[in-house]
Amino acid sequence: MPHASRSPLTAIAEAIDNEALSRCVRFEPDSGQILLFDQRMLLMHGFSLAALRRELIERLGLDKTRELFTRLGYQQGTEDARGLREHAPGGLEGTLALGPRLREIEGFVRNQAVDRMQFNTETGEFWGDYYWEASWEAEVHRQHFGISGSPACWMMTGYACGFTTALMGRPILWHERECVAMGHARCRVVGEPLEDCEDAEAHLRFLQIEDFVSAPRRHRAGPPVAGEVAVEGGGLPDLVGASPGFNEVAHLIKRVAPTDATVLFLGESGVGKERFTKTLHAIGPRADQPFISVNCAAIPGELVEAELFGVEKGAFTGATASRPGRFERASGGTLFLDEISSLPLHAQGKLLRVLQEGEVERVGDLQVRPVDVRIVAAANCDLREEVRAGRFREDLFFRLNVFPIEIPPLRKRREDIPLMVNVFVKRFAARFGKRLTGITQRANAALWAYDWPGNVRELENIIERGVILADEGGNLDVQHLFSGGERFPQTSPRAAVAGDSAVAPAPLGLDGHIAALLDAAGSFGAAEALIFAHALARTDGNLSAAARLLGLRRGQLEYRTKGRDSRAGGG
């Protein structure tokens, strides 16, 4: 299909875009690599990918293949958004403008704006309307299957969703209204926030890599209104994510859930080990049986045996009645042993015997009771290192390490943050009876830049704090979220996002700190947001004290934090 005619101004703008993007692409034939934003790319034959697409449709069906390719595009979009944010900084408007051009360079479509992307950085409002000309996906789908009854630009739709969601900090949904594969003259897509999309549920399936993964919810954050029914997800805990790390964990949970195998969740504190364990129980054969959780670190050493295995009346001072332990209470179901490395060595030996024999003996009792439990353990430290240090029994480690699952920290799956924020804002807004309009771009930039030492638990707590502090009918801003003494990294989070190993940085001088701030922020507005966040954190959220720290009057600080985005954002 021939391109629409272009004005001289459009050609100049594209030349500028090409120059900015060309600096981000490196061809290194001597090493066999093509790099985009320091990520390896592949220059491959379109016809071979088209053949794979066709084979997957024939083997898996149209719906499953659509989910797979849309999810693949979503991950590509979030990664390109990360790369542009860090390597071609130009503020939100510039980055959003480069996204469509980058996808053209990658060879997927030719973008023509019907109504260019419009956004408001204060409220998170968003709108985009584009023609997709020369769509590779639409053309190959029509060649292989003829006229289709549904749109076929799956990767492109996912890419647009991932790209804009990562930059706006809230789920943005793009959907095709016209498609060449359906017989239209060209493809046309519209993008808008999830809450504004009337048929969102029909397009969100691709984010649910498994049935037990929650999709972002369309209804607006706030208390239920008359006639509105809350969606609870069928009793499953909220699990949201679309990053490769999250999806890998979801696949492993699905694989092991139907069995009785012992599972060992590994990961830093706060990554969601208990939530994944509850999901594992809920989708397994013991779902209608008890789920008992015990935090091993919270039990005094002298009471561990009584808590786990039970106690008979009179066994020791204070044992005024016989009571079953956690193993007996969980019999038939699942027992979750959190922070298993905290168990004292004497209790580890008795735990090993119970796991091997399948029976418990209460403290002070001679009777042996059989128990049938599925064991799920969790640790936030390296158990092999604990074994080498003599703090954890090697035989118990081997007994627990049947099916280990490593949950990555939040800083290595930042693309999941907007989806989690969507869930948490709605949850706490409903709990506290508030209705919020959105999240500012300043707050989104700060959420992206923060290193999340407390992982998902910390994110949840920060969003709860923000919802409490935000005004009714207002939006979440930096001063609402980061007012608890949080400290921001002084270097770009790029290495953490990409999973690179990094050497501890040398102390930075003033110039180095400024350079690091610019690298991390990517624009003056984002840098200003980080400075405000630091000042508020250092003054425990006190606006007057933060203003004095920055050499401003309180009114000036309020004007800058509340008025900047409303002046800069589009309609």
Image (tube, grey):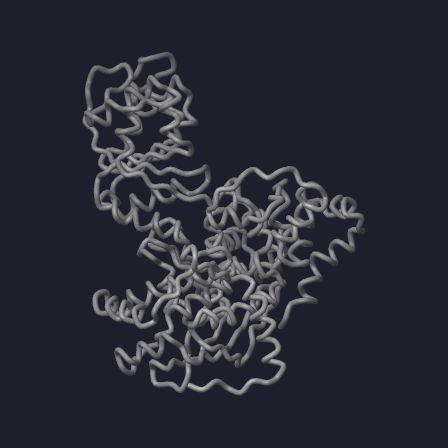
Compared with residue 133, is residue 410 higher up or lower down, i.e. above or below? above
Residue at x-position 61% and y-position 42% = 486
Q: Is residue 392 left or right of residue 353?
A: right
Residue 93 occupies quadrant:
bottom right
The C terminus sits in image quarter: bottom right
Question: Residue 222: in sight, yes or no?
Answer: no
Q: Is residue 88 left or right of residue 147?
A: right
Residue 202 occupies quadrant:
bottom left
Q: Is residue 162 left or right of residue 125?
A: left
Compared with residue 226, is residue 262 higher up or lower down, i.e. above or below? above
Residue at x-position 23% and y-position 68% = 55
Residue at x-position 35% and y-position 16% = 319
Compared with residue 249, is residue 372 higher up or lower down, i.e. above or below? above
The N terminus sits in image quarter: bottom left
Residue 6 occupies quadrant:
bottom right
Q: Nearer the viewer, residue 371 or 106?
A: 106
Q: Nearer the viewer, residue 255 or 338?
A: 255
Q: Nearer the viewer, residue 476 or 446?
A: 446
Q: Is residue 192 left or right of residue 72?
A: right
Residue 85: percent from left, percent from top: 56, 59
Q: Nearer the viewer, residue 185 or 513?
A: 513
Residue 358: percent from left, percent from top: 20, 27
Residue 56: percent from left, percent from top: 25, 66
Compared with residue 255, is residue 388 higher up or lower down, i.e. above or below? above
Residue at x-position 34% and y-position 43% = 278
Residue 203: percent from left, percent from top: 38, 68
Q: How many marks?
A: 0
Question: Residue 418: in sight, yes or no?
Answer: yes
Q: Residue lying furthest front in this view?
A: 30
